[in-house]
């Protein structure tokens, strides 16, 4: 039985179900859009709210979507990443529609370093001897502290 499980481990029967992320613009709905005819209201009614808008140009909308699956003992794998870019003119009328897939996307490397903060670096001697004199200092004083004490 165990010998049969090894070849079957790669079968789709044992794979996790895909999970949809983002707002996927359906290709059939995109085919209904005609540049120069529809407005921003029409596009939003047909495709829904965009995933993002342009930072410096509010007339550019992005519909970003991807599918992912959990991998055994690993991170989720990204599948079928897609971005649909919709451009409008200043009057809010649809001008162009671009579709971008995984083949046109650039991989961005994550930086693994941290930003140093001045004053937080301690030498080995400071770490070893830094608390000498602080331990038990309050217990040796005659002042009982803010709660008062007997006779106050």
Image (cartoon, rainbow, N blue to C red):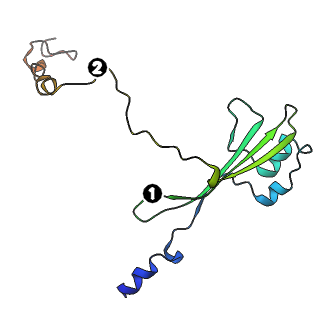
Image check: 11 left or right of 4? right
How many discs mark residues in the rendered view? 2
Vertical side of 99 occupied by 70: above or below? below
Can residue 77 be seen in the rendering of this structure? yes
Q: Nearer the viewer, residue 116 or 145?
A: 116
Density class for disc 2 (Cα within 10 Å; few <14, some 14-19, many ≥20) is few
Check residue 26 in the rendering and tell me which mark sits there, or answer none. none
Residue at the limit of the structure toward the right, as seen here: 37
Density class for disc 1 (Cα within 10 Å; few <14, some 14-19, many ≥20) is few
Mark 1 touches mark 2? (CB < 8 Å): no
Which quadrant is home to the C terminus? Answer: top left
x then y, percent, for residue 17: 56, 67
* Residue positioned 82% across, 44% down in the render: 96
* Residue positioned 51% across, 68% down in the render: 16
Q: Nearer the viewer, residue 116 or 17?
A: 116
Q: Nearer the viewer, residue 7 or 51?
A: 7
Check residue 119 in the rendering and tell me which mark sits there, or answer none. 2
Marks 1 and 2 sit apart, C-alpha to C-alpha, by 36 Å
Instruction: Please tell me whether mark 2 sits on a helix, a strand or a loop.
Output: loop
x then y, percent, for residue 141: 9, 14
Which quadrant is home to the N terminus? Answer: bottom left
Image check: 10 left or right of 66? left
Vertical side of 20 occupied by 150: above or below? above
Residue of label 1: 75
């Amino acid at each position: 039985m165990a010998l049969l499980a090894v070849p079957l481990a790669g079968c789709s029967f044992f794979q996790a179900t895909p999970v949809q992320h983002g707002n996927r613009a359906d290709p059939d709905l995109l085919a209904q859009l005609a540049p120069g005819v529809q407005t921003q209201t029409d596009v939003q009614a047909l495709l829904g709210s965009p995933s993002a808008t342009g930072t410096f140009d509010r007339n550019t909308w992005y519909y970003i979507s991807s599918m992912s699956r959990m991998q055994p003992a690993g991170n989720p794998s990204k599948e079928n990443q897609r971005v649909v870019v919709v451009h409008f003119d200043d009057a809010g009328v649809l001008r162009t529609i671009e579709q971008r897939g995984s083949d046109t996307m650039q991989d961005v490397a994550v930086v693994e370093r941290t930003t140093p903060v001045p004053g937080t670096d301690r030498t080995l001697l400071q770490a070893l001897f830094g608390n000498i004199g602080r331990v038990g200092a309050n217990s040796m004083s005659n002042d009982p502290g803010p709660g008062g004490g007997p006779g106050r």
